[in-house]
Amino acid sequence: TERTLVLIKPDGVSRGLIGEIIRRIERKGLALVALDLRNATREVAAGHYAEHEGKPFYGDLLDFITSGPVVAAIVEGPRAIAAWRQIAGGTDPVEKATPGTIRGDFALETQNNLVHGSDSPESAAREIALWFPGR
Ligand code: ATP
């Protein structure tokens, strides 16, 4: 079994998509082992997106992710990292995400793409320690 860090970004929360997204996680057979609605601090946001520091969209990305509450979750199951990325869809909701995925069904813009998921076991460990210290 494997763990991944899932975020429902502020656009997903403000658009009332928490239930829809959680439903898809559960329907896939993945388990929620931690779940929390909170406002991300600038520090956590910067830590989360450290790999993007210096990119043209970095400042806007930090403003966006701290613009309102997010849902942070630890999701667990066999191949949870890839399984979540499959149901989330590709980063660009139009060019990469396919219909039937969360981004493919509900998003239009690359920044406001509703959700985040860890991209490797190393990222998952780092991100879980950042969002859920001690878990
Ligand atoms: P996430 O890490 O949120 O799951 P990802 O791994 O699919 O997304 P990354 O390339 O790590 O994508 O980018 C992180 C986030 O930064 C994206 O989800 C998106 O919100 C934002 N982003 C990425 N590329 C762009 C871009 N070209 N313009 C605006 N925002 C972007």
Image (cartoon, rainbow, N blue to C red):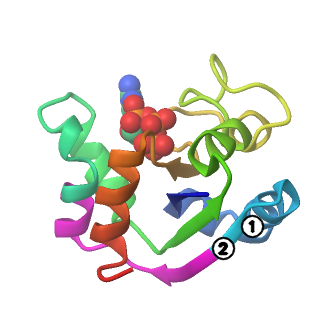
> Which label was assigned to residue 32?
2
**Quadrant assignment, res 90:** top right
Residue at far left of view: 54
Q: At x 62% / y 64%, what residue is drawn?
A: 76
Residue 51 placement, left or right of 34: left
Q: Nearer the viewer, residue 103 or 82?
A: 82
Circle 1 SS class? helix
**Quadrant assignment, res 21:** bottom right
Q: At x 28% / y 44%, what residue is drawn?
A: 60
Disc 1 C-beta below 8 A from ligand 1: no
Q: Position of residue 104 (x, y in %)?
A: 74, 33
Residue hosting label 1? 22
* Mark 2 vs mark 1: in front: 2
Query: Around disc 1, counting alpha carbons within 10 Å, would you say few (fewer than 14), some (14 to 19), or many (20 or more)?
Result: some
Indicate whether 33 appears above or below 92.
Answer: below
Indicate whether 68 appears above or below 124.
Answer: below
Q: How many marks?
A: 2
Q: What's under tag 1, amino acid-wise?
A: Ile
Looking at the rendering, in which quadrant would you find the N terminus? Answer: bottom right
Q: Which residues are magenta?
A: 33-46
Q: Position of residue 73 (x, y in %)?
A: 54, 71
Q: Nearer the viewer, residue 132 or 57?
A: 132
Q: What's under tag 2, amino acid-wise?
A: Leu
Looking at the rendering, in which quadrant would you find the C terminus? Answer: bottom left
Label 2 and label 1: CA atoms lie apart by: 9 Å
The answer to the question of whether label 2 and label 1 lie on touching residues, with beta carbons closer than 8 A, is yes
Query: Around disc 2, counting alpha carbons within 10 Å, would you say few (fewer than 14), some (14 to 19), or many (20 or more)?
Result: some
Magenta segment includes 45: yes
Indicate whether 66 appears above or below 123.
Answer: below
